Image (tube, grey):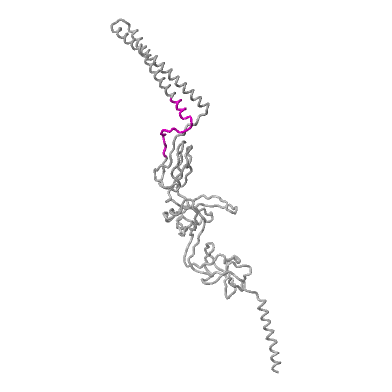
């Protein structure tokens, strides 16, 4: 009897056990999810963008006139004082003459010498006539004083003397002109090779307009240079600043005197600065993806310029973080945990191993982190990047 009763009870127990095992086997497993804890702390809303260092004023020193530039001694990085000589210039050397021009120059010199000899011979003749006219005038004057010649003859002798004196002066000038022509023709032959004369040349010294450093040397070697051609760039590193080209939709949120943190320049320190100016005109730039973007230059001053220019130079890359808003004790979650349901911001909160939808009021966002005004408490756990498998009441497992 006892054995029969036990058999009657064993069958239902085994059936129930099999049913439970079947239910557990067919029950869906928990969905693995990525989770994050709701936390309270300091919240910063910022805009990040890459920038470049530059100088507020760069002085490009150019050749004031055309000439021959001597070798530029200062090199990039060299310190220069106000008024220090940056480079020197000389007049252009005369061009070399070809065989035909050289032969013509020699013939011109011979002709100039002949004209000079002719002028000197003519001067000697005129000087002799002038001496004769002077003696004739003196003789007529003595005869006129004794009443032996008329006044008319006396005046005629004086006029002849004066004509000979004027002719002598003209002959002297002709000799001087002929001498200059000879020197000019000889100068053409002296520099016919195209080389600069070995004697000292007039030299133009161009000096630095400011105290600073050489930023760039456009020309280093000697040679011909035109007027207005750039030679060196000079600047003062104490005027170092940063230019960041922000998207126009971000630039409208930036204000003068706003704090900026600069990293990514190669050092461990965080360089601090403030916005000095948002330029009023933007420009179009094509991104790496081929998208046209409207950018606005924003100029940043370093709070410690000396620390900046001791480690940075012109054209260095930095990553600037504009602090639009910051506060303490702010409830925040990862932005990836938020999604919309019927126009309302919502998150999945894990409650006893199950996902529960909860509507929240969203505040400011700073890229990866978003402020939560209401709907969540610090310490609660939310699901990051909820996928299609996550739904209201679904069993989840933190991965």
What residue occupies the far top of the structure in this picture? 148
Q: Quadrant of the C terminus?
A: bottom right
Count of labels in the image = 0
Residue 189 pos. (x, y %): 47, 27
Give residue 361's quadrant in the image: bottom right
Q: Is residue 210 above or below residue 373?
A: above
From the viewer's side, name the closer residue of 75 and 35.
75
Question: Would residue 251 be seen by someone viewing this image from the given angle?
Answer: no
Residue 360: in sight, yes or no? yes
Residue shown at the point (47%, 46%) measured from the top left: 216
Q: Position of residue 183 (x, y in %)?
A: 43, 25
Q: Say which quarter of the image contains residue 180.
A: top left
- Residue at the spot x=52%, y=72% of the render? 379
Residue located farthest toward the left when viewing the structure as drawn: 146
Residue 199 among those drawn in magenta: yes
Q: Is residue 71 magenta?
A: no
Relative to the observer, which residue lies in front, 53 or 220? Answer: 220
Q: Quadrant of residue 18?
A: bottom right
The quarter of the rendered structure image containing the N terminus is: bottom right
Say left or right for 202 vs 389. Answer: left
Stretch of the chain drawn in magenta: 183-205
Q: Is residue 169 above or below residue 36?
A: above
The location of residue 123, given as percent across then percent down, is 40, 16
* Percent x, y of residue 145: 28, 8
Vertical placement of 382 versus 46: above or below? below
Is residue 119 or residue 297 the one in the foreground?
119
Q: In this view of the protein, which residue sits in the foreground, 18 or 44?
A: 18
């Amino acid at each position: 009897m006892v054995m029969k009763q036990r058999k009657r009870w064993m069958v239902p127990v085994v059936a129930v056990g099999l049913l439970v095992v079947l239910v557990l086997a067919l029950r869906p497993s928990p969905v693995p999810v990525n989770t994050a804890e709701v936390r309270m702390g300091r919240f910063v809303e910022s805009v990040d963008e890459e920038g470049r260092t530059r100088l507020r004023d760069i002085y490009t020193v150019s050749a004031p006139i055309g000439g021959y530039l001597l070798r530029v001694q200062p090199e990039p990085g060299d310190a220069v004082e106000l008024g220090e000589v940056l480079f020197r210039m000389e007049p252009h050397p005369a061009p070399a003459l070809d065989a035909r021009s050289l032969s013509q120059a020699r013939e011109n010199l011979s002709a100039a010498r002949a004209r000079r000899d002719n002028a000197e011979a003519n001067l000697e003749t005129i000087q002799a006539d002038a001496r004769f006219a002077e003696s004739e005038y003196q003789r007529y004057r003595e005869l006129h004083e004794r009443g032996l010649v008329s006044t008319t003859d006396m005046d005629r002798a004086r006029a002849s003397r004066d004509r000979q004196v004027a002719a002598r002066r003209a002959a002297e000038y002709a000799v001087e002109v002929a001498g200059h022509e000879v020197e000019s023709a000889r100068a053409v032959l002296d520099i016919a090779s195209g080389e600069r004369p070995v004697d000292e040349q007039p030299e133009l010294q161009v000096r630095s307009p400011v105290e600073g450093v050489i930023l760039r040397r456009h020309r280093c070697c000697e040679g011909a240079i035109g007027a207005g051609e750039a030679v060196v760039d000079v600047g003062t590193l104490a005027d170092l600043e940063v230019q960041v080209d922000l998207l126009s939709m971000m630039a409208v949120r930036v204000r003068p005197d706003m704090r900026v943190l600069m990293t990514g320049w190669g050092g461990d320190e965080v360089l601090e600065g403030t916005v000095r100016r948002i330029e009023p005109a933007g420009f179009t730039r094509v991104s790496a993806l081929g998208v046209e973007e409207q950018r606005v230059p924003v100029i940043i001053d370093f709070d410690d310029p000396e620390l900046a220019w001791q480690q940075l130079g012109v054209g260095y890359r930095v990553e600037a973080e504009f602090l639009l808003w910051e506060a303490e004790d702010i409830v925040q979650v990862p932005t990836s945990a938020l999604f919309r349901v019927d126009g309302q911001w919502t998150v999945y909160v894990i409650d006893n191993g199950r996902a529960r939808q909860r509507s929240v009021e969203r505040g400011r966002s700073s890229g990866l982190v978003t402020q939560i005004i209401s709907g969540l408490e610090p310490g609660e756990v939310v699901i990051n990047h909820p996928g299609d498998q996550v739904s209201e009441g679904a069993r989840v497992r933190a991965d």
